[in-house]
Image (cartoon, rainbow, N blue to C red):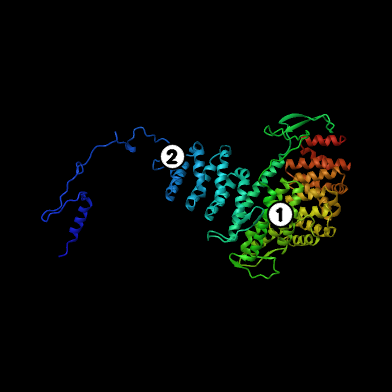
Amino acid sequence: MVKKAGTKRKKAERAKTQLKNSQKTPLSKNKKQSFKLPKGLNELDTRVNAKSLVLPSQLQNEDTSGPSTSRNLPLKHYLIKLKHYSRSTRLDGLKGIKEILSNYPESIIENLSVLMYKVCPLLSDTEENVGKETSRLLLTIVTSVDSESLRPFYSILSAHLCCALSHIDQDVQMIGLRGLDEYIQAIPEFIQISYKQLLPGLLNQISVGKEGIRRLSNKVDCGKVTLLQWRTEVLERLHSLFQLILKEVELKSGNNTFRSFNSKTIAFNDNDPFICQHIDLMLMDESIPIDWLDDDGLNVVKKSSESFSFLEFFQTLMPLLFETWKEASLFSGKRKLNKSNEDHSTLHPSNGPVFTVVVDIIQVMISILRVEMDADVFMKFQKGCEKSVCAFLLKGYPYRFASTSMKNKIVDRSSISINLKFSCIYIDVVNVPMIEVISNILDYSLSICDTRERETDDIYNRLLKSLCNLIFQKNLFPACVEKLDNLLQKSLSSRPRDGQLILLMSSLSSLDSCRDSSITIKNWINNLPLLLVEASKNRDSIISVIHKLQKQGNSLLLKAFSSQMNIVLEMLKASQTTNKINETLQVLIIICYRLQTKYPALIDLMEKADDFTKSLHTNLDPSISVR
């Protein structure tokens, strides 16, 4: 007979609690084996070792007034969770901290030290969600604190950000890149101070090899992006860093003047060849050491030996940029483009961001070196990359994007911007430009002068200035003078009120070599009287160039004012702007003094003038009484 299931279950339950007998006793035929239990084994011991039982919810002295979450848990509770091995626990700790800081912003500055030292290490956490939440939390912290309070923690933030950027897991690297974007916008001072530690980490993300000899990395650990997309992500951050560095070095260069904060007297030896025996050394800061003098007593400023060098870093980066350009011109995503060996000028629109960021980085690198380094160091940079620029970048100049379903206007705008930047790079990098290349640059600039967009005005005017410097001032390419003159004329026709173009023409007009070479500049000087009245922007530049030319006694300017004075005065009468009237009258009074001519209309306008203008008129021409 089969036993019931209930009987089996009850027997199994009894077996769980059945006591085992350790002593072996002989079994009789008619009796079951008996047990002899030790004393106390079948009794419940109710004794408790603790003197009292304490439940947290029943504590009378518990302080609940501090910052806490909706679950009444304090900040300390969540800080402990950040080191837990469980991903969900670490994530819960980060969210709890963010909730407290959002509800109690004043607690950020009170706990800033412990927050930075506890949260920053999670930037390189291998769990993607933890890394993203850490980046968001750090952004909340750094944007809620002033720079002076945050400055002592730049080193710890820089160290862990470098760890994230150089992590073996590419997901962590991407989180580091996104965090870097946020810090560039939120705390640019941190980037300007820590760039020497951050730049090598960014370089390691796209290249492998030893220092000075590096090549592009050919693998991507995560399958979310292609090689070119990953390099573009990294290069865009590099460009943002370089822009902040350029602002920093320009600021230092502008403030690099000796100020008399401290004055110390340095005595030279009796046999010193210098005439003066004493010299006052003006120090910019008290922290500057006085041991900059060499053994002979001469003031020799020695630069500190820093491990980071802009020149070395740029020399390492330039070949990588050229390789990236070459790869982007051959591939679209993972597909190789079907291009002939001689077709170097056609680019694929999908790789437009790659081409743009490459030329942008080269441009800002050149600007940094011009400001930071002396002429000899810049010459070394030129020699190192001159051949590469000619071989890789200008091989297919001018470049164009292949026709796709994209809007032609957007494609043309991108190609125009890239070609204009290439032209500037060529002039900046190549020590002795070739006349064929300069002629091609002029032809291309003439072809796009009327069709270019407003977004390209800055780089276009910069190229125009560089060409004028080469052809007009240095007189290197006399055969290109006519083309450049036509380009100036066409530029003024298409953008007659462009502020940067007015500044360029003002600077060119004050140089004899430019005036003698260009008919367009002469015509522009002839139009200065009308520009003086019509221009609402860049009036200071126009007034400045008029003063320069009249001091030089420029006959072209004086003749222009002499023939157009009555027209200018009539236009000025119709003006309703007081400042504009006074500024223009002051210029006209000086011009009339130069011309030794009196204009009744000018005397009538003096009724609208201020006291300074009236006194200027009286002093320069005492015979005329002001009403």
Disc 2 marks which amino acid?
Lys
Residue 339 location, quadrant: bottom right
Residue 283 location, quadrant: top right
Spot occupied by residue 221 in the image (x, y as percentages of width and height): 54, 59
Whether residue 212 appears in this view of the structure is yes
**Quarter of the image that includes the C terminus:** top right
Residue at the location (77% across, 40% down)? 582
Helix or strand or loop: what does disc 2 sit on? helix
Spot occupied by residue 486 in the image (x, y as percentages of width and height): 80, 59
Disc 1 marks which amino acid?
Ile
Spot occupied by residue 21 in the image (x, y as percentages of width and height): 20, 49
Q: Depth check: give the residue in front, 273 or 330.
A: 273
| Residue 123, numbered circle | none
Helix or strand or loop: what does disc 1 sit on? helix
Residue 455 location, quadrant: bottom right
**Quarter of the image that includes the N terminus:** bottom left
User: Dot 2 corresponds to which residue?
Assistant: 76
Whether residue 625 appears in this view of the structure is no
Q: Depth check: give the residue in front, 572 or 47.
A: 47
Left or right: 490 as drawn, with respect to 17:
right
Spot occupied by residue 599 in the image (x, y as percentages of width and height): 85, 42
| Residue 459, numbered circle | 1
How busy is the neighbourhood of tag 2: few (under 14 within 10 Å), some, or many (20 plus)? few
Number of callouts in the render?
2
